[in-house]
Amino acid sequence: MKKQLLSMKSLLLNIFNGRIVSPWLILLIDLVIVINAYILAYIVRLNVLLSSYSASNIILSSLWVVFVFLIAFLISGSFKGVIRHSNYSEFKLMAITCLGAFIFLLAANQIIIKYDLAWIRVSRLVLMLHFFLSIILTIGFRMIVKEMYIFLTKKQTSHNVLIYGAGDMGQITMEAIKNDKDNHYNVVGFIDDKASKWNIMLHSCPVMSWKKALEINEDKQVHSVILAIKKISVQKKHEITKDCLDKGWKLKVMPSVGNWVNGISNEKQIRDIRIEDILGRDEIQLNLGRIMMGLDGKVILVTGAAGSIGSEIVRQLLRFSIQKIIMVDIAESALYDLQQELLLSHSDAPFEVVLADVTNKKRLNDIFEEYKPEIVFNAAAYKHVPLMEAYPYEAIRVNIGGAKVLADLAVRHKVEKFVMISTDKAVNPTNVMGTSKRICEIYIQALSQRQDINTAFITTRFGNVLGSNGSVVPLFKKQIEQGGPLTVTHKDITRYFMTIPEACQLVLEAGFMGEGGEIFLFDMGEPVKIVNLATEMIRLSGLKVDEDIKIKYTGLRPGEKLYEELLASKENTLPTHHKKIMIGKVRKHDHKKVNKQIEEMMLALQIENPKLLVTRMKALVPEYKSQNSEFAELDKQFESSAS
C-alpha cells in the first residue's frame, strides 16, 4: 500500500513539474466548471419553482451562457497561467472575468426580453447564483491544485519557523516560502509589535507578541525566526538576536525589496543574520540635495578603487548623475573583479578602470591630463598595522608619498575638491601605519592653507570598517569555518566599528559640506570589546563558546593599542548640520616646513634604514609614541634629548 502511494505521488509530481497540461485543457476544465455551476444554479432555482422551465430551454440557455463565458475567458486569458503557481492576481483576474460575463448576460437579457427570445432567456436569480458558483468553483479548483502541489513537494524535514513581522514584508516572506518547493520551512506563527494584530490569524497562523513567542512550549520545536520588517532599529535587532540565541533559535533575515536578487523574492534569499546587522547603526539620513549638486556632471577620480572603501565609494557615486568615474588601483585582480561586477550591475555606467601606482608621479600626471578629474577621493593606502610596523619603508612610500603626489597634482590641475580618507589610528599614533596617515593629514591641512590654490582639501577620519579586507570579522568567520580557535590579542581590547556603506555615505556627506582644510570626524558610536564580538559571532554560527569553538589570547601585536581614539587630547570639535559628523579643530602647520620634511623623508627612503626613517616620522609627529614595538627605544632617545 505504501509503495502504491509513493508511486501515485511520483506520478502526480511528474504531472505537476512537467507542465504537460495545455492551457486549452485548463480552458476546457473552466468551461466544464461553468456548465456544472449553471446546472447547480438551476437545481437551486427549480427547487423554488419546479415547473417554470423546460429541459430544452435549460440546455439552450446553458449553451448561451457557456458561449459568453468562453468569449470572456479568451479575452482575459485567465486560463493561461500555471495553475500550481496561481496567486492573488490570477484569482482576481478570474473573478473579474466572471463578473464581466455576468454583467454582459444581465444586459443581454434586456434585449432577449425585448425581442422575445425566450429560448435563451435566463432568470436573474439563476444568473446571480451561477455567477457566485462560477467564481467559487474556478478559484477553488486553482487553490486545490496549488495546495496539492505544495503538499506533494513539501520537504519532510521542514523546520518550524516564526516570521517576525505581520505586515507586507511578513506576508511576502510567507508567499516566498510557500511558493518555493525546495523550502525547508514550516511557518507556525507570526510575531508583531502592534498589539492590535495580536490573537488574529494570518494565513492560518496565529499572530502574537514577541514576549508570548518566547514562551512557546518546547513541543512546538521552533527552529528559526525570520525577520521580515522594512524598518527596525539596530538596538531592537540586537535584542531579538540575543533572545534567539538564548532560546537556541536561529535568526534569519528577509532582505528589503530593494535588495532582492533580480527583483524576485524567494526562499533562497532568506539569509542568516550577520554580525554587521547588529553592530551597524540605524539608517543614515544624507543631504542628497547637497551631494547631488556637488556631483552633478563631474568627472571623479577614485584611488584605491578596488579596495573595500574605494569600491563602495564607487558604488555610492554611481547613484548620482556623474559624468564619469576613473577607478585607479594597482591591484590587478581586484580591479578586474570590480570592473566585472559593475558591468553586470551598472552596464551603462560611465566608468573607466586604470591600472596605476599612486606613487608614480608621471603616470598619475598623465591620468590627470587625459581625464581632467574635478573631484578626487583618495582611498589608496596600506592599512595593516603589523605589516607596516615591519616595513615602514612601504608605509612612507605609499601612504605618505602617494597622498603627496595626488594632492600636488590636484593643485596643479586645479581639481575642485580633494577628499582624503584617514583613520582613527592617526590620533596619538602608536604605530607606523597610524603615523603615516597622520602625516598625510598634516600635509593636506597645511597645503589647504596656501592662498594661491583653489582646491578644497577635505580629510575624513573614522574607525574600523566591518567586513573590509583583512579586518577582524572576515578573520573570525574563516577561523569559525576551520573549527577555531578565534584569536584575540587581549581580553580588554576594544575598537570602534561601522559598516562599509555607512562609512562611505558619511565620506560623501562630509566631502560636500567642507570649505577646505577641515578634518571631519565620524560618530562611531560605542566601542566594542573584541572578545564580545568573537563570542557573538560564535553564537550566531549556532556554536557554543569553549565547547565547540575556543577563544585564544595571543598578546598585543607590534604597534597595537588597547583602545583607539578619534580625537587627540589637544584637539576639540565643532558640530556640523549632520549629527554624526564633527569637525576636528587641529593645530596649524606651515606648508613650506612640512613639505621640506616630507621631501627629505622621501629622498631618505633610498639610503636610510627603518629606524632612521621612523625617527623622521617621530620628528614630524611628536605625539607618536611606539607601543609594543622595536621602535619604542627611539622614544627614549627623544625624551633624553629634550631634557
Image (tube, rainbow, N blue to C red):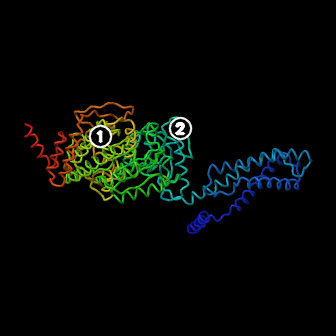
User: What is the crowding at mark 1: few (fewer than 14 residues within 10 Å), some, or many (at least 20)?
Assistant: some
- The quarter of the image holding the N terminus is bottom right
Q: Amino acid at mark 1?
A: Pro
Along the line of sight, the residue nearer the viewer: 522 or 451: 451
Contact, mark 2 vs mark 1 (Cβ under 8 Å): no
Q: Nearer the viewer, mark 2 or mark 1?
A: 1
Res. 249 in view: no
Q: Is residue 622 above or below residue 351?
A: above
Residue 546 located left or right of residue 292: left
Q: Residue 441: x percent and y percent? A: 27, 41
Q: To which residue does mark 1 refer?
A: 527
Q: Is residue 250 above or below residue 573?
A: below
Q: Mark 1 or mark 2, which is nearer the start of the sequence?
A: 2
Residue 412 located left or right of residue 570: right
User: What is the crowding at mark 2: few (fewer than 14 residues within 10 Å), some, or many (at least 20)?
Assistant: some
Along the line of sight, the residue nearer the viewer: 639 or 33: 639
Give the CA separation, mark 2 to mark 1: 38 Å
Along the line of sight, the residue nearer the viewer: 505 or 289: 289
- Which residue sits at x=14%, y=53%? 609
- The quarter of the image holding the C terminus is top left
What is the secondary structure assignment of the residue under circle 2? helix
Q: Residue 70: x percent and y percent? A: 77, 55
Q: Residue 614: x percent and y percent? A: 17, 48
Number of callouts in the render?
Answer: 2
Q: Amino acid at mark 2?
A: Lys
**Seen from this angle, which residue lies furthest right?**
116
Q: To which residue does mark 2 refer?
A: 197
In the rendering, which numbered label is found on residue 92?
A: none
What is the secondary structure assignment of the residue under circle 1? loop
Q: Residue 208: x percent and y percent? A: 49, 40
